[in-house]
Image (cartoon, rainbow, N blue to C red):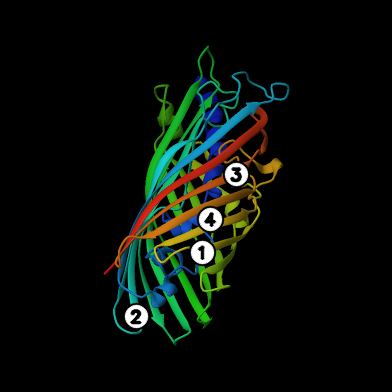
Amino acid sequence: MFYQIIKISATSALITSFSLFAGGLDLSEYSTSTSVGTAGNANQTNIRDASTVATNPAAMSFTKNDMLTIGISALDFHSDFEVDTSKSTHDGGGTDNAGGMNAVPGIYYVQKINDYVHWGAGLYSITGLGIKYDNDWAGRYHNQKVLLSSIRFGHSLSYRVSEEFSVGGSIYVDYATWETKVAFDTPGTSDGYLSVEDEDPAVGAMASFMYTPGDTTRIGVTYRSKVVHNFKDKPDTRFSGVSDVIGDIEAEFELPQMVLVGVRQELTPKLAILMSGSWEEWSKFGELQVKTRAGEDDIDRNYDDTYSVGIGLEYQLTDEWLLMCGYKYDSSVQTRSTRTADLPLSSQRRYAVGAEYKYSKKMTIGVAYEYADLGTPKLDQTGNLSGTISGEYDQYIQFFTLSCTYNF
């Protein structure tokens, strides 16, 4: 009877905790000053550095030289939660900061093969979210820890159809790491817990084009395919024999397909305006399948498709200095009724500034800062065995970025 209670409680809690992997955090920052310093608005039309291999492969056709770009971003994710004790079932309070600091790298290379074809390769990370609550917080039976991080390695090709038009494509491997931990109520004074960890490679693809109707205008469009990850692990637990009762836990996670658009228009020889937009099909990927020996469950989190719109500026202050800024709005994948403790997201607003310094004819160094306001989403989550957790978050992400581009 004891193991039966644990089996039901743990399986229910783990199924609840898996919602993150149906709607992870997709970043528009590629760890370069151009990307971060414009809040991602330059991604589709950028030809100054080699990150175009990951943002819009077709734009490689318009780069002037073979180039190598190396960048690093320090990502500071901050998440406070204030519990509403009048609505929450369990004691334990909220948490001061369930986020943390992470390093996000980017290495990109572009090479001209001939007058028509360019090739590129990139190693980068643009997907991830990690939340780690205090062990005794009031929502511990919903989630204690969840982490999704991935790094991508891809090859890209572009073909210049004409002086004004190019097409491109990319195939990449997305290597993802998944961790989750959840508590469950057991007979006695202390909680039980289960934790699961796995890694999985999956393949994705991009197709894109760039159109330059004049010397002062660039238009870029990219389609990015879905990426499907399948995770499987035998859980660790505090109680002997529980892992054998539950068996392996399997979960399927899918990143959505999306369409990204960007426009760059020079207003004067020194000033350019950047505009961007995107559509991401999160609605279908709120559907998740979780399997254990205790049974399986198909979950529909009722997520919404999301969109983003943004605007930025680039100003050539001197021959050596380029200044940048940007703003972007991202709609929310969730509403209050579908929000969960492992993915407490709302609409997002990004504010960014950056600068690039031409150190020599071949080398450019850039720095950038971005503040992403994740809002103050409210949480009202209830589970049959995990009770109710209610309260409000205060969340943001800061990006501190340093990058260098070398032209061969």
Residue 373 numbered tag: 3
| Residue occupying image coordinates x 55% and y 34% | 79
Q: Secondary structure at mark 4?
A: loop
Point out the tag, 4 or 2, that comes first from the N-terminus.
Answer: 4
| Residue occupying image coordinates x 64% and y 57% | 305
Residue 39 numbered tag: 4
Q: From the viewer's perspective, is residue 115 above or below residue 377?
A: below
Alpha-carbon distance for marks 3 and 4?
Answer: 12 Å
Residue 173 numbered tag: none
The residue under label 1 is which amino acid type? Answer: Tyr
Alpha-carbon distance for marks 2 and 1?
Answer: 30 Å
Q: From the viewer's perspective, is the residue at label 3 or at label 1 nearer? A: 1
Residue 341 percent coordinates (x, y): 59, 35
- Most extreme residue toward the right is 86
Number of other residues with Cα within 10 Å of mark 4, as a class: few under 14, some 14 to 19, many 20 or more? many
Residue 162 percent coordinates (x, y): 44, 87
